[in-house]
Amino acid sequence: MTLKCIAVDDEPLALQLLEDYVDKVPYLQLVATCSDAFEATAVLQQQEIDLVFIDIQMPGLTGIQFIQSLTHKPMFILITAYEKFALEGYTLNVVDYLLKPIALTRFMQACNKALELYQLKHGQGQAPAQEAAGYFFVNVDYSLVKVMYQDVVWIEGLRDYVKIHLKSPAKPLMVRSTVKNMEEELPASKFLRIHKSYVVAIDSISSIRKNSIFIGDMELPVGETYRDSIAQLTKRNI
């Protein structure tokens, strides 16, 4: 599946970054880059576009004014350097709202949300393309690293980073992200949040006790607020 998209920003460097990021997402096809909303209007009149990445503050017509002007709207991901515009953007039912400077991991999450919404609208299920393919991408040392779901054992939160523990003997992957962001990106059918600092691969769980989950000899704590999830998994209280 491919989503046709355009990027709209009056800053050339910001536009180049969006172009580079889009090129890294397998299911996105960049149809055009536009320096203002008027160029974007011309593109939308010429062909069908699924997704628009658009800066809010632009001369002539802002990103929000542009969205409001359209009768038939594609999906939108808003981009800005100012958090104060977030609420106004969400009243327009945009897919996501990205703050500059945009981290690649955060960009990928927004794209996955757009793909899932597209699939829901077109009756193609809820799973993003990566889940169907059995993998996801993470940003490690300025490169996108492909990680197979089946290779992940558990994920550990460390302040502004997460450590992805793998089945292979290779050392864990250190990714600049949060446990919450990883939980939102990973399929709930394969992974379970058990603690504010831990997400585990369900297939890797060997046993469960009242306050712990065991992965082989490794014991991980179960947070009080996540015990209901464990109960649903086991169909019994622990």
Image (cartoon, grey):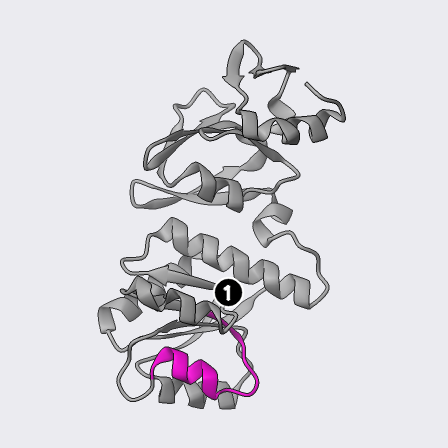
Instruction: Residue at the far top: name it.
Output: 217
Give residue 212's position: percent from left, percent from top.
57, 16
Query: Measured from the top left, where is residue 161 in percent x and y?
Result: 34, 35
Q: Secondary structure at mark 1?
A: loop
Residue 198 lies in the magenta-colored region = no
Q: Is residue 165 left or right of residue 141?
A: right
Using the image, determine if residue 209 lies above or below residue 113. above
x 41%, y 23%: residue: 170
> How dense is the environment of label 1, judged by Cα within 10 Å: few (below 14), some, or many (20 and up)?
many
Instruction: Looking at this view, name the residue that lies furthest to the right.
Output: 235
How many numbered marks, from 0 up?
A: 1
Answer left or right for 71 relative to 33.
Answer: right
**Does 216 sit above or below residue 108?**
above
Q: Position of residue 198 (x, y in %)?
A: 48, 28
Q: Nearer the viewer, residue 106 or 42?
A: 106
Residue found 32% across the figure and 83% down from its top:
36
Residue 116 vs 16, above or below: the answer is above
* 77 shown above or below 103: below
Q: Which residue is mark 1?
A: 95
Residue under the image location 55 percent in, 30 percent down: 225
Q: Is residue 72 magenta?
A: yes
Q: Where is residue 213 drawn, in percent x and y?
A: 58, 18
Q: In this view of the protein, which residue sits in the foreground, 131 or 91? A: 91
Q: Amino acid at mark 1?
A: Val
Quadrant the C terminus occupies: top right
Residue shown at 69% from the left, 68% from the top: 122
Quadrant occupied by the N terminus? bottom right
Q: Where, by quadrant of the figure, is residue 210 drawn? A: top right
Please state the extent of the stretch shown in magenta in the rendering: 62-76
